[in-house]
Amino acid sequence: MTSIRGRLFTILFTGFIAINVLTGWSVYLRVIHELDVVFDYQLKEVAYATSLGHGDLIPLPSSEALYEREARLAVQVWKGKELVYASNPKRLIPAQSQGLTTLYLDQKHSNEGWRLFTLYSFGKMVQVSQPLEARREIGIKIALRTVIPLVVASFFLIFLLLLSISYSLKSLKRVAGEISNRSFAVLEPIEERNLPQEVIPMVECINTLLEHLSHAFDQQSRFIADAAHELRTPLATIQLQAHILNRSSDEEEKKVAHEQLKAGIERATRMVSQLLALARLDPEMHVAQSETLSLDKQAQEIFDAYEKIAHKKGVRLYLVENEPLSITGEAEALRELMSNLVGNAINYTPSGDIVTVAVRRTYRTAIFEVCDTGPGIPPEERERVFERFYRMKGAVNGGSGLGLSIVKSALDRLGGNITLGEGYEGKGLKATVEFSMRPPGG
């Protein structure tokens, strides 16, 4: 599991180490360069001071004199090929070739690197030398004195940053604690006060999710309560008729009870099917998967499926128009929408009357239209009929009040609109569904 604190520490620590290494190396190179300039000048000054000295030069020291290796400068004076003076007999650098100009030179002698300055003056050759290693040691010491405070400051800064990160992450811990206290029974939004600006968008998304979950749970609870109430009647009827069949000895009475039992089972079966359809179409509980749908082919399938049902009831079902049109949506939602509109129209249309189905286009939309010659729906109730388990006053057909609710849920998934109006010659109901057409070849 990746930790934000651990990741930030790793990034910061690695970054500071890299910065300090680069800074230290840069400082070291700069110090060495500046020291070279200073020490070269020092070699030159010593050489000139030695060449301009008054009186005789100091005699050559005894070879038994001991000098520490750390002696920084070694001065030699030559007259011709004779060494007349050496400040450090143990560090004798071979004389350079005679000339008339001054000279800086790096030379290797006795496995050591030397920096030499040679001055030719008044028949003498003054040679001042210095170990390169001494320069490097001084350079490292100066560089360390410069970089160590930077390193200490960097670690102190990392410590402050980690404290700041830990303090800032407390808000995430608080949010996590509040989320852990939520349950399906308690879905209150998380308090956004005193939260960092970067955390607020995440909390807003979580609150939106909690709101959707709360709405879904409330909807589910109401749905279960309504379903239990609506199923109670057909189940009670089934139980009663089964009891009559079991106790009655009259054949006529058994026949009536058998018919009512069959009707009760059919009604309960239809209601359960519709409840399942509503559950499948609930937008709060489903992730949409859109595809290209052929409106005319689906209408033809529904027409073929309901033609025999309509004929059995004595209703004439016609497919009056069926233009080839395509829309984008979910096949199951479209099938449920068409099935419920056509089924409702047949159910509420008296025997001997007609129901028409049409698929046609307008300038910008595709139309699916079902028109019947039944009792229709009064204008004042055309909005409420889409509510679950709502049945109009005085309705004689034993519907469950779910058909148009299924249509509404399907439209929410398909993105269409439905309009309820009067049917033929002001009689019956005309349901007009509009869809956005899929562009040809789109």
Image (cartoon, rainbow, N blue to C red):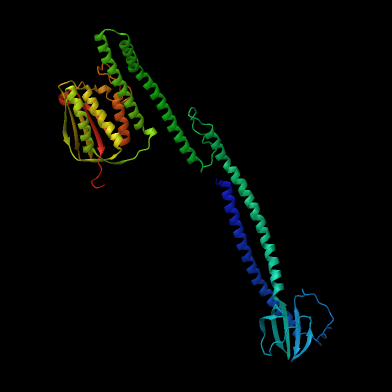
Query: x%, y% of residue 43?
Result: 71, 79
Q: Residue at x 62, y 62 (%)?
A: 21
Q: Residue at x 68, y 58 (%)?
A: 149
**In the figure, is residue 171 to the left or right of 65?**
left
Q: Image quadrant of residue 346?
A: top left
Query: x%, y% of residue 334?
Result: 28, 35
**Vertical relation: 32 (above or below) 286:** below
**Vertical relation: 171 (above or below) 395:** below
State the residue in front, 418 or 127.
418
**In the figure, is residue 132 to the left or right of 289?**
right
State the residue in front, 408 or 2.
2
Q: Is residue 118 visible?
A: yes
Query: x%, y% of residue 288?
Result: 35, 38
**Vertical relation: 375 (above or below) 45:** above
**Vertical relation: 302 (above or below) 156:** above
Number of residue marks: 0
Q: Image quadrant of residue 32?
A: bottom right
State the residue in front, 108 or 244.
244
**In the figure, is residue 2 to the left or right of 240?**
right
Q: Is residue 122 visible?
A: no
State the residue in front, 77 or 170.
170
Quadrant for the N terminus, please: top right
Q: Image quadrant of residue 145?
A: bottom right
Query: x%, y% of residue 364?
Result: 22, 40
